[in-house]
């Protein structure tokens, strides 16, 4: 497993007395630090049984998801997964990674969720009834080595998540804690009929969908392929599907950005996720082809009675005939009437999503500043200096944008 010297040093510095490897004996109440991939893989069974006992199980909290996410994050971070054991059994997991931001002595040591941009949520994983005890155990462990990390960022927390309770416990111990509103995870309810739902959509959306269908039909022979959830495709079919998705992503506008599936990290993530999702019956992939050539795709997971859209790409050369829009309309219609609850579109209130729905689940973000000089400096910058500079910048921009001879509003009062 490739890991540079600074990452190895960071993991070593964060070990503390009582933080055990997976193979070590476990005391009645102990914390284990999982810093190697082999140790992470060994936790699969216990981890998923813990998710099953939690109050809000989610595919984004299962071991398969984090195993896949690590294939991406291993290039820029070190594993820092904390497991709390009670009476020798895994009772909670705080799935973190450690990464350095910046270079040299001023580099910030940041702890954050083991997450990738495709994650629709993340949280502390804990069995029902153990929430308070787990939070206290993790805080004691992190506080014991508070000089070894500068900031802990918890992003993508569902409203009312355990991560928020963890933040409250840090606040009680007089850490500096910043709670922020984040995105909403928009969704389309699937409990009604397609006709009833589509009847609520705007005329402009329906017109755009009809135009996209007409353009595609004029351009050539259109076909849609769907790997359905629960089908458990063969390994070679999974590999072919992943290669198709990667190819479309490479030809899309995302081919120029770091999160495109043709890039090493994202591709390693999607390959591992596809393998595990196919085994579990979660994998759902749609592709639309024009004269046999794949031109658009949507990659989904279907679990817990919900559809989670993770990736949607189209060939940039086909932008004028809108294959992605056509596929979105077709697949969404087929999601209705299958006993599913919601079609989640992913965090972010993008305009195209808001054409389909205005319903969403709120996500929060919490930053906990460490008790190091760097941690306090980051807190000062983020909470005081940065907002003040932003205010000055905005005032300068308003003044420059004002027509000649006008008086700023405050000066007229």
Image (tube, rainbow, N blue to C red):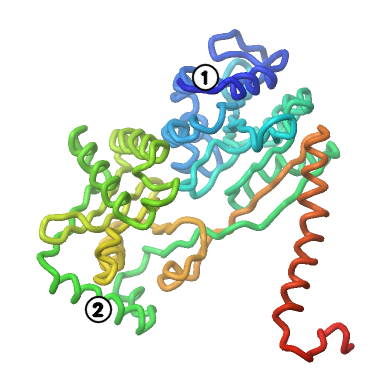
Q: Which residue is mark 2?
A: 211
| Res. 225 in view | yes
For marks 1 and 2, give the CA distance. Answer: 52 Å
Q: Position of residue 65 (x, y in %)?
A: 44, 37
Residue visible at 58% across and 41% down? 123
Which residue is the site of mark 1? 36
Mark toward the start of the polypeptide (1 vs 2): 1
Query: Does 377 sit above or below residue 276?
Result: below
Dot 2: what SS? Answer: helix
State the residue in front, 206 or 232: 206
Q: Nearer the viewer, residue 336 or 372?
A: 372
272 on left or right of 409: left
* Total numbered labels placed on residues in the image: 2
Residue that extends furthest to the front in the rendered view of this protein: 404
For the point 63% across and 24% down, the residue is: 84
- Residue 104 horizontal side relative to residue 331, left or right: right
On screen, residue 118 versus residue 227, left or right, reads right
Q: Residue at the location (57% across, 35% down)?
A: 125
> In the rendered view, would you say 318 is above or below 156?
below
SS for dot 1: loop
Q: Quadrant of the N terminus?
A: top left
Q: Quadrant of residue 149?
A: top right
Q: Position of residue 261 (x, y in %)?
A: 36, 45
Name the residue located 43 percent from the left edge and 67 percent from the top edge. Answer: 353
Residue 306 visible, this orientation: no
Q: In the shown orientation, is residue 400 left or right of residue 61?
A: right
Q: Give the quarter of the figure containing the C terminus.
A: bottom right
Rendering coords of residue 24 (x, y %): 58, 9
């Amino acid at each position: 497993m490739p890991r540079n010297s600074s990452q190895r040093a960071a993991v070593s510095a964060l070990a503390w007395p009582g933080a055990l490897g997976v193979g070590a004996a476990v005391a009645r109440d102990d914390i284990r630090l999982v810093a190697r991939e082999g140790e992470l893989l060994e936790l699969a069974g216990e981890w998923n049984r813990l998710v099953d006992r939690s109050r809000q199980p989610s595919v984004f909290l299962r071991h398969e998801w984090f195993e896949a996410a690590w294939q991406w994050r291993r290039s820029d971070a070190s594993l820092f997964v904390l497991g709390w054991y009670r009476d020798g059994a895994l009772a909670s997991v705080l799935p973190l990674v450690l990464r350095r931001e910046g270079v040299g002595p001023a580099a910030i040591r940041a702890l954050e969720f083991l997450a990738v941009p495709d994650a629709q949520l993340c949280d502390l994983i804990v069995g029902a009834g153990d929430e308070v005890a787990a939070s206290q155990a993790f805080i004691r462990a992190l506080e014991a080595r508070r000089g070894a990390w500068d900031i802990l960022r918890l992003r993508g927390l569902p409203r009312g998540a355990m991560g928020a309770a963890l933040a409250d416990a840090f606040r009680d111990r007089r850490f500096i804690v910043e709670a922020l509103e984040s995105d909403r995870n928009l969704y389309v309810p699937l409990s009604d009929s397609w006709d009833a739902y589509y009847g609520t959509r705007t005329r402009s959306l329906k017109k755009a969908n009809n135009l996209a269908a007409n353009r595609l039909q004029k351009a050539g022979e259109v076909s849609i392929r769907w790997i359905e959830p629960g089908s458990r495709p063969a390994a070679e079919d999974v590999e072919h599907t992943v290669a198709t998705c990667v190819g479309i992503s490479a030809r899309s506008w995302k081919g120029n950005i770091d999160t495109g599936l043709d890039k090493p990290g994202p591709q390693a993530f999607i390959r591992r996720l596809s393998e595990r999702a196919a085994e579990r019956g979660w994998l759902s992939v749609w592709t639309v082809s024009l004269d046999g050539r794949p031109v658009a795709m949507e990659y989904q997971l279907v679990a817990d009675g919900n559809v989670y859209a993770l990736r949607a790409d189209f060939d940039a050369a086909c932008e004028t005939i809108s294959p992605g829009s056509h596929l979105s309309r077709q697949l969404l219609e087929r999601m209705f009437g299958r006993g599913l609850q919601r079609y989640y579109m992913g965090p972010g209130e993008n305009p195209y999503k808001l054409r389909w729905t205005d319903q969403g689940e709120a996500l929060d973000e919490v930053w906990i500043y460490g008790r190091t000089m760097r941690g306090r400096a980051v807190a000062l910058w983020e909470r005081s200096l940065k907002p003040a500079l932003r205010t000055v910048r905005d005032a300068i921009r308003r003044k420059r944008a004002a027509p000649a001879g006008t008086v700023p509003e405050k000066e007229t009062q």
